[in-house]
Amino acid sequence: MTNNQLLLPTTMQFVDIIEPGGADKLQLKVKALPQLAPGYLLVKVEAIGVNRPDIFQRMGSYPPPADASPIMGLEISGSVVAKADDVTEWQLGDKLCGLVEGGGYAEYCLVHKNIALPLGHLSFIQGAAIPENFFTVWANVFQIGKLKKNETVLIHGGTSGIGSVAIILAKAFGATVITTVGSEEKVKAAELLGADCVINYHTDDFVQVSLDYTSSRGVDMVVDIIGGDYVAKNYLAAGKFGRIIQIGMMKGNPINLNMMPLMVKRLIHTGSTMRSRTIEEKSQIAAELKQQVWGMLQNSEIKPIINKIYKLEQVADAHRHMESGDLIGKIVLLNN
């Protein structure tokens, strides 16, 4: 034990992908602990957030960046057990949550000092449910999309991890929220999150409802995780100078897209991914979250929505639950 490291084991459990495929291709294995690099913390992982990119990585369609851990897992919470010599902002034993490029599905994980945030009053489970969605929503909706107070935003998938956080933050900063969901149960859940107008896309046309709700003006912003045929419909639902923020493409690319509404309305259609961003970009997002959002989380003014908790050895069940689509909020894995 030193000033920069607690007494540690030499190996750890982690979730390995035996080969690309279904959830049955996941297996617990043992390997050496990751090696510290300048600017990094080694965290004893207590909880891990499960995200759809984990599913894609398991299936072989979302490889990690070349310099990232090949282990799945994009967000964790836990305690600092070792730190690089150049790290002064964090102390051994500090409890935090953090965004990572990979490596989360393990007992120990490296987190950059500037992309970690203090848990404070948050539990490990809450902390593990925050980084990926809050970083993604903040970067897309507020940094890129520049959502303003009193604007109207249409958020697709309102009870998903991304969608629920988008609703929570949009309302916290004074926007009016329209959202789409796939069942009456989810309608009620989205209303509880604070959405002003909730559309069951199985029974109603979200374009028409959005236009009716805005007195034919159209929405100022669309936050879309769906893609596919939703893209053309988003152009119709948007008002003049509207912004379309593409965060996901669950239905794939649009086919035979008519872009004339985009041109006539002078829309902006943009998007981004989080995993490939630089440390500097992610550090800026973390700093803004700490300044503008962290107080609301600490005071329980807003909170992440937890759907279900699994143990790490139940990771295959957690992935099957994610793939079923039958969830409201976040799935979390526990390490103990």
Image (cartoon, rainbow, N blue to C red):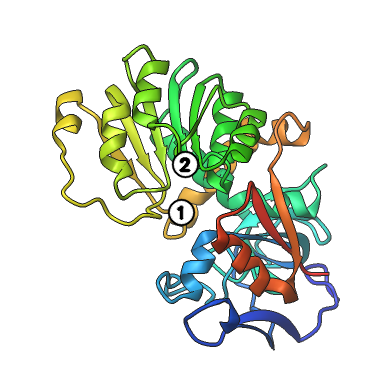
Residue at left offset 38%, top offset 29%:
221
User: Mark 2, residues whose alpha carbon is within 10 Å: few (<14), some, or many (≥20)?
Assistant: many
Contact, CB < 8 Å: mark 2 with mark 1?
A: yes
- Secondary structure at badge 2 equals helix
Percent of width and height locating residue 199: 49, 31
In this picture, residue 207 sits left or right of residue 330: left
Provide the residue designation for mark 2. 139
Is residue 321 placed above or below 263 in the rendered structure? below
Q: Tell me which label, 2 or 1, sits earlier in the chain.
A: 2
Residue nearer the viewer, 213 or 48: 213
Q: Quadrant of residue 336?
A: bottom right
In the figure, 137 relative to 108: above or below? above
Q: Position of residue 287 (x, y in %)?
A: 58, 41
Hey, which quadrant is residue 78 in on the image? Answer: bottom right
Residue at horizontal 20 percent and vertical 32 percent from the top: 262
Residue 308 location, quadrant: bottom right
Q: Residue at x 44, y 56 (%)?
A: 278
Task: From the image, tell me which residue sits under label 1.
Answer: 274
Q: Looking at the image, is 122 positioned above or below residue 298?
A: below
The quadrant in which the N terminus is found is bottom right
User: Is residue 100 something that shows in the picture?
Assistant: no
- Residue at 55% x, 87% y is 18
Q: Secondary structure at mark 1?
A: loop
> Tag count in the figure?
2
Q: Is residue 243 visible?
A: yes
Q: Position of residue 35 (x, y in %)?
A: 64, 78
Amino acid at dot 2? Ala
